[in-house]
Image (cartoon, rainbow, N blue to C red):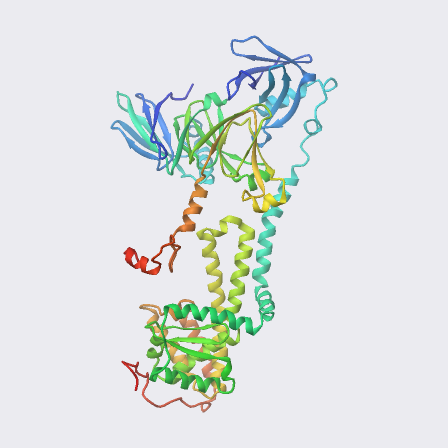
Amino acid sequence: MSMDIIDYEIFGDDMQYVEIELDPGEAAIGEAGAMMMMQDGIEMDTVFGDGSKASATSGLMGKLLGAGKRLVTGESLFTTIYHNESQLKRRVAFAAPYPGRIVPINLQEMGGTFICQKDAFLCAARGVSLGIAFQRKLGTALFGGEGFIMQKLDGDGLAFVHAGGTLAERTLGPGEILRVDTGCVVGFQPSIDFDIQYVGKLKSAIFGGEGLFFATLRGPGKVWLQSLPISRLAGRVLAYAPRAGGGREEGSLLGILGNVLDGDNR
Amino acid sequence: MTVWAGRLFGPGQPAAGTEVEVSMEADTLRLRAAGEYARQVAVTALSVRHTGFNDSQLQLAWQDSAGAWACHLGAAADIAALLAVWPRERAPLPRKLSGARRRRMLPWATLTIIIALPLMVLAAFLMSQDRVVDFIAARISPAVERHIGAATLAQVKTTTRFVEQGPQAQALAAVARQLVAGDASAYRFHLADDELVNAFAVPGGDIVVYRGLLEATRSADELAGVLAHEMQHVALRHSLKSLIRGAGMSMLWAIIVGDAGSTLAGQAADRLLSLKFSRDAEREADAHGFNLLVERGIDPHGMVRFFATLAERDGATPPALLSTHPASAEREAALAARLASLPADCCKPLHDGPWPPRATTGITP
């Protein structure tokens, strides 16, 4: 096939990076800004669009379309290709942008397509094409926690996606349903039916803290879930962030005096 | 015989499914994985439905002694071809599959309503907000307003020292007496011991003037101008109204965007809206304040002059008083127009002693 077969190794526990070994002539694509280090001999090349072969041969309009799609998913217009120009095996590493786990996805095993949340993509073997999967189920798009735009990875090589917090991988049998808190879905096989379900009781809907709807994933197929979506983490951090005119402090016995003694007077 | 690409899920199969070739022979579905003998299922045993992401796949599901099985077809052309040769008389298809797409318009209509409705509510509120706010403000009694004001003032007092006596406090009281004339009970004036060039009114009639502002004025008329302006904020219940407006806005905002309202963008939008409000209010207070000065026989030139002074300082470090106020140039122009239409001998200057009064140093005898 047109895919490059790449070897990889993932380092770290909760703030991971993945190191990809490229044979001479092989290449990987990375999300702009995700590269952490690369050995001598690896050339970096930035292309307009998604860097897949389809986009490279499709002329200007095709490239613009590819780039436009990437813009819609909230990513950079450009993709960076890292190719090994030396005669030896060389390594390039990509780091996850926030605490969480890096998941290797074997697209061939998935049947060629993988759907993931729109900022999950980290890097992949050259030949994987990045597209958007527009969520056409209205309810799911509005209340499923992943919005209207999801990302589609096509190809038959390895792709790496990133999830926040701890990762859960689940296999669902035909017709098996998993109910998930909205926002916790990282990605799934396209055979999975991604839908929403009303929590069922008015009391739970209002006071249960999970909102009006669960996301539901109906099998068959594989799904990946994250324990801590970055938006949730950011929301919590923001709630405690100091604001102009004094922020919320940890309860201190010293009170105002404590702030003075702190030496960190804003 | 045509063969379609499918994916088989079921007991003993890999979690992500196995690639299979799907074909249809008479009333039997044949599935063949690479290097395996074909698996056969009678169409009468199959349940057929659309599923997968965006319902883009066709699921053929059945049960046997080993458990639940499903075969998925992904390509649209394959699905159409399979449905075309499906023996409908033997195994009827569900209505959804046999009928063509019909309800396509419904989701889009719903989407439009869901997105447009909150925006319309917001637009309606923004357009009629003055009326809505006035309506609510009219239902809040002055006692409640005073209560809110007292709480605000108490909070100010925790961080700022108020000057109760001395030449500056006396001067402020003297000018204030001239302004309030009859209804002395409606307003209380306070002098705050702070370098800031600022003055503000809290709901209920308490007006706080900063020492910095008092010292920046060059005559009693100028101070009277500022006081007249602040008194109008009280009389027109501006603080109360902006409070109501802010509460209404953040409530609407929360209803419309949910969690996102607590983000920075939400707060910024909130603040911008309230800033816009106070500019309209300042203009109103300027106009009414000017009239009050004329009514009391105080020379309004002082007011105009002082705002011009502030505008000059504006360039360097904008005084706090200006941060929420209309662009000084525009404001001056509006006031100058009013001055021009004034009779020449309408009023006389206030107070002829030395100005500004000195701050008290040490203990007053």
Q: Nearer the viewer, residue B183 or B165?
A: B165
Residue B29 x %, y %? 64, 14
Is the C terminus of chain A in the top left, top right, bottom left or bottom right quadrant? bottom left
**Residue with the most extreme right position:** B89
For residue B69, what is the image quadrant?
Answer: top right
**Residue with the most extreme front position:** A253
Residue at image point 37% right, 38% down:
A97
Q: Nearer the viewer, residue A54 or B109?
A: B109
Q: Nearer the viewer, residue A121 or A100?
A: A100
B68 to A248, vertically: above or below? above
Determine if residue B25 is in view: yes
**Residue with the most extreme left position:** A40
Residue B141 x %, y %? 58, 72
> What is the tally of numbered marks visible in this picture?
0
Is the N terminus of chain A in the top left, top right, bottom left or bottom right quadrant? top left
Residue at image point 48% right, 67% down:
B278
For residue A120, what is the image quadrant?
Answer: top left
A54 to A262, vertically: above or below? above
Residue B218 x %, y %? 34, 82
Determine if residue A51 is in view: no
Residue at image point 29% right, 55% down:
A262
Q: On the picture, is A50 further left or further right than B98? A: left
Q: Nearer the viewer, residue A46 or B149?
A: B149
